[in-house]
């Protein structure tokens, strides 16, 4: 295919530099990577990876954790507690594990 169009894109310089470093290791230019991405959009008739909002279930779980915190008096958090919330938010631990860990942290804290 003949490349006959130019695209101008504004992007964070750190994102550009880091991605170019990785692409260079792969032997690709940024232009080639963008061309590959756009080609995949055509092939898949959409974005070639999942883009989604948090589910209602995840939001409800986060609200439940907030209620648990408030039920213990809404005390100030510590680094261990913050780590539990972070792991839950990332999806690394389940709601049940987060709930158990929060209760233990309040008991021991």
Image: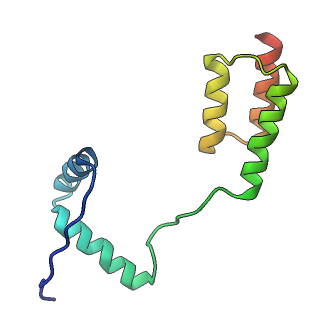
Name the image quarter holding residue 2.
Answer: bottom left
Name the image quarter holding residue 28.
Answer: bottom left
Q: Is residue 85 left or right of residue 75?
A: left
Residue situated in front as seen by the camera: 81 or 36: 81
| Residue in the picture at 61% in, 60% down | 53
| On screen, residue 7 above or below 17 | below
| Residue in the picture at 20% in, 53% down | 20
Name the image quarter holding residue 55.
Answer: bottom right
**Is residue 2 visible to us here?**
yes
Toward the top, the furthest residue is 109
| On screen, residue 96 above or below 108 | below
Image spot of residue 8 (x, y percent): 19, 68
Image spot of residue 39 (x, y percent): 31, 80
Image spot of residue 78 (x, y percent): 65, 16
| On screen, residue 92 above or below 82 | below
Work out which quarter of the rendered image holds the C terminus and state it.
top right
| On screen, residue 95 above or below 106 | below
Image spot of residue 104 (x, y percent): 80, 20
- State the colouring used for the structure image: rainbow
| Residue in the picture at 63% in, 41% down | 89
**Is residue 92 visible to us here?**
no
Q: How many numbered marks are there? A: 0
Residue situated in front as seen by the camera: 66 or 93: 66
Q: Is residue 90 left or right of residue 47?
A: right
Q: Is residue 106 left or right of residue 53?
A: right
Toward the bottom, the furthest residue is 1
């Amino acid at each position: 295919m003949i490349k006959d169009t130019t695209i101008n894109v504004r992007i964070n310089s750190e994102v550009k530099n880091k991605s170019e470093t990785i692409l260079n290791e792969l032997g690709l230019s940024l232009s080639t990577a963008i061309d590959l991405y756009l080609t995949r959009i055509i092939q898949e008739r959409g974005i070639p990876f999942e883009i989604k909002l948090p589910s209602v279930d995840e939001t409800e779980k986060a609200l439940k954790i907030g209620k648990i915190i408030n039920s213990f008096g809404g005390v100030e958090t510590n680094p261990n507690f913050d780590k539990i919330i972070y792991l839950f938010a990332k999806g690394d631990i389940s709601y049940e594990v987060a709930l158990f860990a929060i209760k233990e942290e309040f008991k021991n804290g």
